[in-house]
Image (cartoon, rainbow, N blue to C red):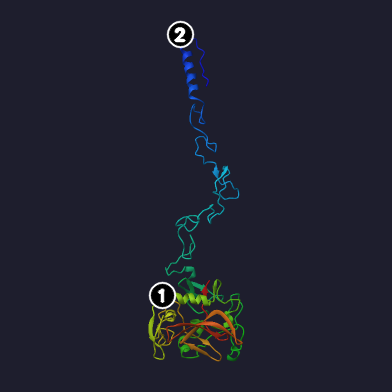
Amino acid sequence: MLYYVPSVNYPQPMQKYLFILLLLIFSCDEALGPEDCAGVAGGAAVEDICGVCSGDGTSCYGCTDATACNFDATATIFDNSCEYEIDICGVCAGSGYLDGACNCNGDTIIDCAGVCAGTEIDSDEDGLCDIWETVIDIDGNIYNNILIGNQIWMQENLKTTHYRNGDEIPTGYTDSEWKTLSTGAYSVYPADNDLASQTTCGNNCADIYGNLYNGYVVNDERGICPQDWHIPTRGDWDSLVIFLQYNTEPIEYISGEGESLVSNNVGGAMKSTGTMEGEDGLWFSPNVGATNESGFKAYPSGSRGTNQYYGMGERTYIWLLEFLVSHDATYTLKSSIVFDSPDFSLGNSTSYVGHSIRCLKD
């Protein structure tokens, strides 16, 4: 240690005292010892393994692998902390969205379409977004929709006359021609065919009940339902029935043979209510178990068979997207709901028969 002593002429006795003082100072420094890493003479501070004075020995530890997402260019000692996965928000080793958030911006509101921070609304609070309340087919026909469980169904039977790509669906076949077809076609139940059609159809049964399509339309790869909709599969119908079984009260009723039966009433929960006799519905009496609890509104649209139209007011058959070939005949699966039972059933039908179609949202 150096000390600056100004060049001043002190009296002789004073000079003696200054010399003694400086000698004491130098003696003290030598007694304290050398400086530590902090510059303190005789201090105890030392550098850690990372070269940091008085450090805790951790500052140089880290991920030294340059391919890791948490690579630390300042680290010199590998500590097994490297991470290689980046989460949905771009955070290395992150856990995804923050607690309570539905996206990386921290938004917490999911709209009725299930989109985080989306803009779709459900103004009538029926569980269905306003944009899904209706759907339009290729011909411009507008259909009301209904949410049942987690499925969105058309609430009306299909009435389009074109495939989704715009191709026309043939029609106008006679009975003898109809039963020999092996390609897609549709018919409209005649408004003057029977009591039910004369009572409920007005001038055009398709306006109320939709068209009757053969099974070849159902299985045509061009598709008949609107974009983003499809003819329901067996699995789709199973999901609907299972939901209704768990959400519909069983009922007891008397069958046509006078037998007392108990039903889970799935068909009743799907049927529109009222009767023609009561002038408040489309079904013939007794329309057993009809509550339309599901909102499906199954109408008794009837069918076109081999040589006749039949069943309006009594039953509705709705096609499933499933095609079978057996014993040189082709079959398509159908669902069945009838006026004198609350039950719902599945079966098959020869593909030249005409039944209704309901579409389901993808």
Residue at left 50%, top 22%?
30
Q: Position of residue 121 (x, y in %)?
A: 46, 65
Where 112 sits versus 174, above or below? above
Is residue 159 visible in the rendered structure shown here? no
Where 294 sits versus 109, above or below? below
- Residue 275 lies left or right of residue 226; in this view the side is left
Which residue is disc 2 drawn over? 13
User: What amino acid is at disc 2?
Assistant: Pro
- Residue 154 lies left or right of residue 183; in this view the side is left
Q: What secondary structure is marked by label 2? A: helix
User: What amino acid is at disc 1?
Assistant: Asn
Circle 2 Cα neighbour tier, 10 Å, few/some/many (<14 / 14–19 / ≥20): few
Q: What secondary structure is marked by label 1? A: helix
Is residue 269 visible in the rendered structure shown here? yes
Q: Position of residue 216 (x, y in %)?
A: 59, 82
Mark 2–mark 1 Cα distance, whole angstroms, equals 115 Å
Instruction: Please tell me which residue lies in front, 123 or 14.
Output: 14
Q: Going from the N terminus, do you reach mark 2 or mark 1 first?
A: 2
Nearer to us: label 2 or label 1:
2
Which residue is disc 1 drawn over? 247
Q: Position of residue 206 (x, y in %)?
A: 51, 83
Instruction: Please tell me which residue lies in front, 277 or 79.
Output: 79
Where 112 sits versus 52, above or below? below
Circle 1 Cα neighbour tier, 10 Å, few/some/many (<14 / 14–19 / ≥20): some
Where 98 sits versus 223, above or below? above
Instruction: Please tell me which residue lies in front, 23 or 173.
Output: 23
